[in-house]
Image: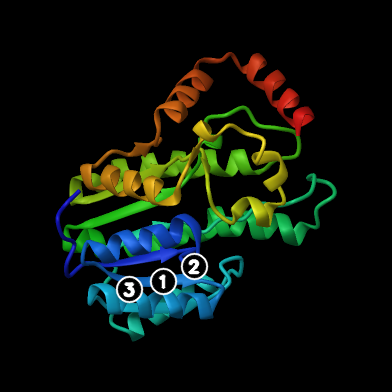
Amino acid sequence: MPASLAGRTALITGASAGIGEAFARLLAAQGANVFLVARREERLRALADELEQEHGIRAEVCAVDLSRTEAVREIVATAERMRLDIDILVNNAGFAASKNFLSSEWAELSAEMQVMMGTVTELIHRFAPAMKARGYGRIINLASLAAFAPTAPSMLYTGIKAFVLNISEAIDMELKPHGVYVTALCPGFTWSEFHDVQGTRELTDRLPNFMWQDAETVARAGLDAVMAGRPVCVPGAVNKTLAFTSRLLPERMRYQLGKVGKMVE
């Protein structure tokens, strides 16, 4: 990791907690200015004030609901008004529907896809041209170990994360010759609020400790990877093994394992 990112500006979505907050702290410690995006304005402003005081960087916030189709336009307009040139984009915000596919309202499924597919793709499309023109850019997209795993009945999440993995590699191929690196960060189980919001805390608490990583470790691995130009980052030896093994399984076996996984839940 470089000793300093002084003078660079990083936009981080889902920055109020978890991996997003860890990225904000890590980037600010490296000297980068940060543009923090999430729904909870009070938490964003508290974090921004803390980072400015601790690291002497510029920290701005934009409180917006990323499930709204107008959200990216509002983020871009705010960045322009504040005269922020985005050099680093961290697409971290997450969302997961809590019910089976047919039991979910379409609005909830649409919001899940908008946050983790539509918003991610549009933010890249909006900010990457300026990165390309300047000859420098770093983009980290939060995929997941689930992108490699067998899916489970009713889950859109694994398909969405596979999409994020795929487009990250595709866009990296296009932009790398112009000095813009794109990395799909694919963590496994990470200590954060996500499982509480998703309603899976009781299930995940049964997993052994060796399967878990903290948010700071995941963020550091992602930043190291994108700075080195690696298009895919699976942090942790256990997760690397699971990702590699899963890719080798025949499709029929993946399908059967997915059904078993859902039964265990």
Q: Look at discs 3 and 2 and give the one toward the viewer.
A: 3
Residue 155: give x, y in percent of width and height: 70, 40
Is residue 74 visible in this depiction of the protein? no
Dot 2 amino acid type = Ser
Q: Look at discs 1 and 2 and give the one toward the viewer.
A: 2
- Return the residue at label 3: 51
- Return the residue at label 1: 36
Dot 1 amino acid type = Leu
First in residue order: circle 3 vs circle 2: 2
- Return the residue at label 2: 16
Q: Gap in Å between the C-alphas at discs 3 and 2? A: 13 Å
Q: Gap in Å between the C-alphas at discs 1 and 2? A: 8 Å
Instruction: Name the secondary structure under disc 1.
Output: strand
Looking at this view, name the residue that lies furthest to the right. Answer: 103
Tell me: residue 19, above or below residue 62. Answer: above
Residue 142: give x, y in percent of width and height: 46, 49
| Front in this rendered view, residue 222 or 17 | 17
**Dot 2 surroundings within 10 Å: few (below 14), some, or many (20 or more)?**
many
- Measuring 72% from the left and 44% from the top, which residue is drawn there? 202
Residue 28: give x, y in percent of width and height: 28, 66
Residue 170: give x, y in percent of width and height: 37, 41
Is residue 33 visible in this depiction of the protein? yes
- Are the residues at dot 1 and dot 2 in contact (C-beta closer than 8 Å)? yes
- Measuring 63% from the left and 20% from the top, which residue is drawn there? 254
Q: How is the image coloured?
A: rainbow
**Dot 3 surroundings within 10 Å: few (below 14), some, or many (20 or more)?**
many
